[in-house]
Amino acid sequence: MSDKAQLTVSGIKNDLDQGLSRPEIQAKYGLSTRDLKSVFSHPKLKGLKTKPVPQFVLVDDEEADVIVATPEAVAPEPTPTVTEVEAEAPLMSNEF
């Protein structure tokens, strides 16, 4: 039976998102320097860098129950679209 570590692209991406550096990922999975280089030569991992993770949580204690809407939190209004049936239907005239 083999003692090879099983790595996934999503797992490595998650490690980077959690702030782990390449040497930390190497230590986490027990990889050699050659293996680490091979992992990051994968097309979906090539060029990815560690995302900085804030070392603090900022809590606003001056105002209670204030909800701040960010652009990401606000869903855009749906844009009405013309269906093919509406586009092909003739306009009705009130002339008889």
Image: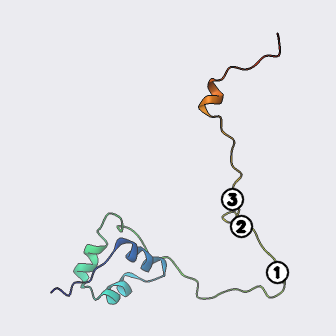
Q: Where, by quadrant of the figure, is residue 40 drawn?
A: bottom left
Disc 3 residue type (three-letter): Ala
Which quadrant would the C terminus be assigned to in this image? top right
Q: Residue at x 71, y 62 (%)?
A: 74
The residue carrying pointer 2 sits among few (fewer than 14), some (14 to 19) or many (20 or more) residues within 10 Å by Cα, namely few
Q: Is residue 15 left or right of residue 91?
A: left
* Residue under numbered circle 1: 65
The front one of 51 and 95 is 95
* Residue under numbered circle 2: 70
Task: Residue 7 in the image: state x and y as whole percent.
Answer: 31, 78
Q: Mark 2 against mark 3, which lies toward the viewer?
A: 3
Q: Is residue 33 left or right of residue 14?
A: left
Disc 1 residue type (three-letter): Asp
Q: Is residue 84 above or below residue 33?
A: above
Q: Mark 2 against mark 1, which lies toward the viewer?
A: 1
Q: Where, by quadrant of the figure, is residue 32 drawn?
A: bottom left
Task: Residue 15 in the image: state x and y as whole percent.
Answer: 43, 80
